Amino acid sequence: APTIGVLALQGDVREHLSALSGCGAVPVPVRRPSELAAVDGLVLPGGESTTMSHLLGVFDLLEPLRARIAAGMPAYGSCAGMILLAAEVLDGRPDQQQLGGLDVVVRRNAFGRQVDSFETDLEFTGVPGAPVRAVFIRAPWVEKVGADVEVLAAVPEVTSAGADAGAAAGRAVAVRQGSVLATAFHPELTGDMRVHALFCDMVRAALAGSG
Ligand code: GLN
């Protein structure tokens, strides 16, 4: 079984660990460079991207993590994790650090203060069966994607996104570039493990590919 880390500096670490074990992976919290070196893939959880970015520096993880992502380690970011993986962030803090890996521009807290949280059902490419129930909590959206980025899910035209529904409709909220996956929402909170299962398959494929 693949060993999949969850960056455990801040955020909803426990929920990701349990979703990963539900998919047959061996989940481990990652706080040190030695722990990062031992995983086959890494989840960057939801939480607060500016705090996580700061703690990555404090824990000496920033450069090792950038290096592993650049070397092709599979990574999955949910919400704040998506922000960390993005090449560029709009409405971020000036000192916010990016890990790269995902050639996208995201807008932080994009859905607006009126709708800090909302839920909707999404069609998700690569997740067969019923739509995915997506929980958005002060979520980003993807504003621009590079040529190598695949949009896997977008907010439907009719949503419950309250006052900002017009602006939210059609926005990309799940993307993939090679072995990097990101969702603006939190599949770890719904008990539906299909998005984590997709990531576990990506990690298994990367392991098989590297022999
Ligand atoms: N708004 C948070 C940020 O900017 C992300 C929220 C989340 O991860 N639920 O990092």
Image (tube, grey):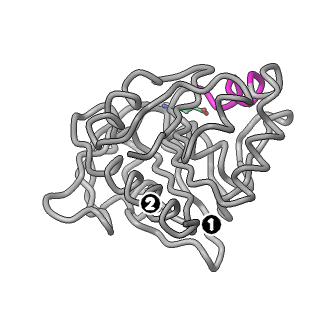
Q: In front: 101, or 24? A: 24
Main SS, magenta region, reads helix
Residue sitting at the far left: 130
Image quarter where ligand 1 lies: top right
Q: Is residue 38 left or right of residue 4?
A: right
Q: Is residue 164 above or below residue 154?
A: above
The location of residue 199, given as percent across then percent down, is 41, 53
Q: In front: 57, or 166? A: 57
Q: Residue at x 62, y 66 (%)?
A: 144
Label 2 Cα neighbours within 10 Å, binned few <14 / some 14-19 / many ≥20: many
Q: In front: 96, or 112? A: 96
Q: Is residue 2 magenta?
A: no
Q: Residue 40: in sight, yes or no?
A: yes
Q: In front: 83, or 210? A: 210
Q: Give the label on residue 202, or none.
A: 2
Q: Earlier in the sequence, mark 1 or mark 2?
A: 1
Tell me the kind of residue under disc 2: Met
Q: Give the label on residue 144, or none.
A: 1
Q: Is residue 165 above or below residue 162?
A: below
Residue stretch rendered in magenta on the structure: 48-55
The location of residue 140, given as percent across then percent down, is 54, 45
Which quadrant of the view contains residue 71?
bottom right
Tell me the kind of residue under disc 1: Lys
Q: Is residue 180 left or right of residue 93?
A: left
Q: Which image quadrant: the C terminus?
A: bottom right
Q: Is residue 105 above or below residue 24?
A: below
